[in-house]
Image (cartoon, coloured by chain):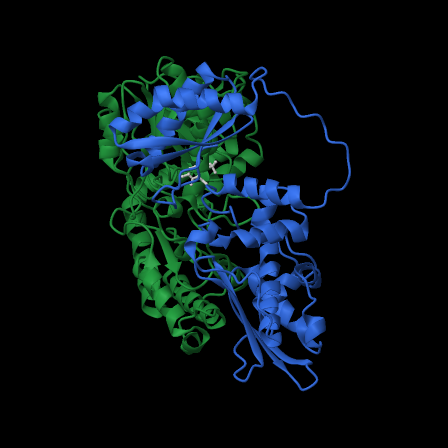
Amino acid sequence: MTDRPIFLDNNSTTFPAPEGVEAVLPLFGEIYGNPSSTHSFGQKVRHEIELARENVAKLLNCKTSEVVFNSGATEGNNTAVYAALDGMPERKHIITTRVEHASVLEVIRYLAEAGYRITELSVDRLGHIDLDELKNEISGDTALVSLMWANNETGVISPINAAGDIAKQFGALVHVDAVQAAGKLKIDLKEELAIDYLTISGHKFHGLKGAGALFVRESAPFLPLIRGGHHEDGRRAGTENAMGIVAMGAAAALVNRNLDKHIEHMKKMRDRLQGGLLAKCEDVIINGDQMDRLPNTLNAGFKYIDGEALLMMLDAADIAVSAGSACKSGSMEPSHVLLAMNVPLSAIHGSVRFCVSRYTEEGEVDAAIDKIAGIVKRLREMSPFGHTETRQDALSAEALEKHKAYFAKV
Amino acid sequence: MLTYSDKIKDHFINPRNVGVIQDASVVGEVGSMSSGQALKLYLKLDEAEIIQQASFQVFGSPSAIAASSALTEMLKGKHIDEAARVTADDISEYLGGLPAEKMHTCVMSMEALEVAYARYRGIELETELDEDDELHICRCYSVPEQKIERAIRDNNLTTIDEITHFTKAGGGCTSCHVDLKMILERVRAEMPQPKEDKPAPKIAPGGNMTNLDKMRAIQEVLDREVRPGLAMDGGDMELVDVQGNKVFVQLHGHCNSCASSTTTMKFFVEDRLREMVDPEIQVIDTTEHSDELHAPPMR
Ligand SMILES: Cc1ncc(COP(=O)(O)O)c(C=O)c1O
């Protein structure tokens, strides 16, 4: 057992690696120059930033000149979309998917108002896009194909190699949101890979919030989103977030050294969690493909209960998870990803995302399983549909049949 | 994330009166699995019709749990006739005010109470909430039309967002927003209006065309430019309504099954209509697609 709060929300953000924090500390002290200055105050910081760039380039296996630092993936995704469209002025069609992060989807939907034709590829029940649909929709008018490497809610991994190849046959540019892939999968942007832009974000792989990187292939057109200086080779103006960049560089170096071990550990913890929950709770469904999935992510639907109720009870028990989309303001809206996968709303209600990290310990997983199972049981006992004795007398036989029939479809 | 008051949290983490009263005098049940929330309210009355015990079982969000818990506390010791006058606002107030988005949970508690009261008094409820899918305006959350109408009237709602907060309707795939808007307009028109000077109606940018002229022109373009092409694929497009510059259409036959083709279609039709009738026209597809749970439409 463990007394510390247990963080199982590692797709929303992650624990800052102690090595990264240590690397940043001098920047709070005497290394404080402006990296654009020629004097040695500035050059010391410039040196740290360039070291970080090398580590990030290694993480992605690309050239250092292809790495543009920015404020994170939301900026990176915006920049990539606008850069690509600017580079293909004669083309007026964009292809993306229904399950993208808002920082891609909302930008592209906004562009519909500017006269672009938008295709949002559908996904199947397991969360996969259909490459045939891509082949049918793409044409010589397609400027950009934007899709995520791995989904933040389900962890489902996209066939980006194949999709990129199809895009190239039609001369379209390719953007990949790899925010959830960094630190959890091997990313190798070798030249034959048809990716022109790729986004990552430091805080998703144990860096700090507010720093990310956009990969821009040497051959790809570019247009800065933020102007006003020669920073980042004129590709992103503004004095660099040196602390965030240095922490991201250190985090990248840790991934570069130990990715295989990290993957193995995360997978072990996730599978332990999944196995434990399936053993201790009845009526649980796993959302998304369990094979092509990030090693750290588990999206589980607990039937007969409400996900927000589960989330808040877990929070009161010091376990952090997420339900629906955390980034949505105000109310908990049903997840657009699960909706697109045609998960019935009644199952979406009880869907919760658990994400481990390389720091997650076995004891934490075991403690979490017990607490989650207890709370699920309690909520079901409280529910008129709860899977307990009371459920039998709480519902008429006819109503029970109806609900069973409903879930037979799930 | 929403932030909840301490009182709501308390009633959620430590709900009062959970469970079944085996010898309840009356039980009120509302909601369903597909609507995402359900409540079963048990009341036990003494000979003087005073509520001695109240309990509940609930499926729903933290605020649904808190509202149910609060309701049972509020009912205890009350005469059934007095109890029946408890409103959704009273429950919210008891909890120190619920976030607007969560008002529907208090509405559900109140409805369960109404059902229980009606059953106890042998009154037939005029709005027996229907389980039949056909009658649901919001299919995501299975919300019937009467419930929406009533929420608008009782709470003087003026926007689709407010309807969603009170009834959940429209909170899912959003494809029913067109219907919600029409219901809202109709119910508000029927409601007694506070007297005020109406602003002069805006003149449509499409020149001096009346709505009827415009509708005819649009129909002509559809007949000439759109429908023959669709017919070749076994499909058709119906003009449902024209409101100002909003053109509501519905797809039939082969082409109503695929959301991406309808998106393409929408742009094509919009293009033609903008060119031939009015540059401001906006086409709105009201087709119920066979996979009704697709992602929200583009806006
Ligand atoms: C898939 C995906 N893309 C983009 C983002 C946005 O990243 P950032 O927080 O760096 O803006 C996130 C994080 O929420 C994400 O999960």
* x and y, in percent, of residue A79 in the image: 44, 24
Q: Nearer the viewer, residue A330 or B67?
A: B67
Is residue B232 in sight in this rendering?
yes
Residue A54 seen from this side: no
Looking at the rendered image, the quarter that the N terminus of chain A falls into is bottom left
Q: Position of residue B118 (x, y in %)?
A: 60, 71
Number of marks: 0
Residue depicted at 30% across the width and 27% down the height: B230
Q: Residue A290 in the image: state x and y as whole percent.
A: 27, 52
The residue positioned farthest toward the bottom in the image shown: B47
Rendering quarter of residue B269: top left
| Left or right of residue B163: residue A73 | left
**Shade of chain A as shown in the rendered figure:** green
**Residue found 23% across the figure and 27% down from its top:** A166
- Residue A186 appears left or right of A8: left
Q: Would you place residue B252 above or below residue B113 in this image? A: above
From the viewer's side, name the closer residue of B262 and A291.
B262
Quadrant of the image containing the C terminus of chain A = bottom left
The residue located at (37%, 15%) in the rendering is A87
- Residue A342 against residue B8 in the figure, above or below: above
Q: Is residue A46 left or right of residue A125?
A: right
From this view, report whether residue B28 is shown above or below residue B222.
below
Q: Is residue B279 above or below residue A288?
A: above
Residue B264, percent from left and from top: 36, 27
Which chain's colour is blue?
A: B
Quadrant position of ligand 1 = top left
- Front position in the image: A89 or A213: A89
